[in-house]
Image (cartoon, grey):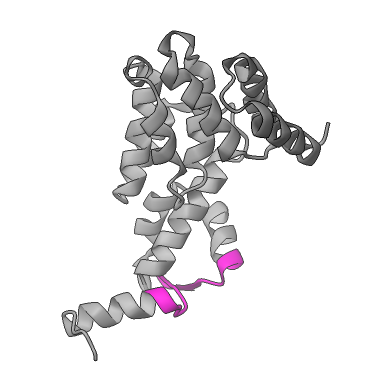
Amino acid sequence: AMAGELKEKIQELLSERRFDPTIAPELESYVEEQVKKEFYDLDANLALLRFYQYSPSTAKVPIISKILVKALMQLPGTDFMLCMYLIPVTAQKDPSIETLKTLADKLESCMFKQFWTEAANAKALTDAIPKFEESIRNYIVGIVAATYQLIEREELEGYLNQKGGDLDAVLTAKKWIVEGGDVRIPLNEYNEASVKLKQEGINFEQ
């Protein structure tokens, strides 16, 4: 079935039986489908995590970790946090869940170099999910674009964990300009404001 059809079928199931724990196996296999067919359904995933919350003994860590990796790919959305709230404490203590939480913390604190170091050790969890690195890079690119007008190329390599031609492809796609060892980021509503604040020492204009 196509992703769209699956989504409709699951929405129908949830509208009729959202609080019926016997639908959990169907929601679990739906998580696998989201991974395989590269789509995402937060509502269904939260419904499944709620069942796990109510009866922690039924919680399946490999399914939870797939839900969390998919949620992390939605940054800057708050999906990861929403999912974490529902995960039973017993499952939260699992090393794979702890690892993903560390990844999320690094990203949300903008510790991008540390993120890639940690991510290298988490490949068993993330490699199974198509486009994981690509989604995270898009998120980091968004943060960089909102923060900098000029950044050292070397710094950017560390943030994106990319060098040479791979990084050049990103720069071309984003229309960022190489100036010697630096990269210039065209003005946008965000980086213009942040530079202005730095120059003025935050001065609220009336």
Picture coordinates of residue 180, whole percent (x, y)? 41, 72
Residue at x-position 36% and y-position 70%: 148
Q: Is residue 157 visible?
A: yes
Work out whether 116 lies above or below 205. Answer: above
Q: 199 and 72: which one is in front?
A: 72
Name the quadrant of the N terminus.
Answer: top right
Work out whether 53 lies above or below 156. Answer: above
Picture coordinates of residue 97, whole percent (x, y)? 39, 23
Residue at x-position 45% and y-position 78%: 188
Residue furthest to the front in view is 16
Residue furthest to the bottom in view is 206
Residue at x-position 47% and y-position 26%: 50
Q: Assess whether residue 192 is covered by the magenta stretch.
A: no
Work out whether 173 lies above or below 53. Answer: below
Question: Tag count in the figure?
Answer: 0
Q: Is residue 4 left or right of residue 51?
A: right
For the record, the magenta segment spans 172-190
Q: Is residue 126 left or right of residue 22?
A: left
Q: Is residue 182 visible?
A: no
Name the quadrant of the C terminus.
Answer: bottom left
Q: Assess whether residue 179 is covered by the magenta stretch.
A: yes
The quadrant holding residue 174 is bottom right
Q: 122 and 73: which one is in front?
A: 73
Picture coordinates of residue 173, whole percent (x, y)? 61, 65
Residue furthest to the top in view is 57
Q: 171 and 101: which one is in front?
A: 101
Work out whether 46 lies above or below 114. Answer: above
Picture coordinates of residue 51, whole percent (x, y)? 50, 20
Residue furthest to the right in view is 1
Q: 102 and 25: which one is in front?
A: 25
Residue at x-position 42% and y-position 31%: 120
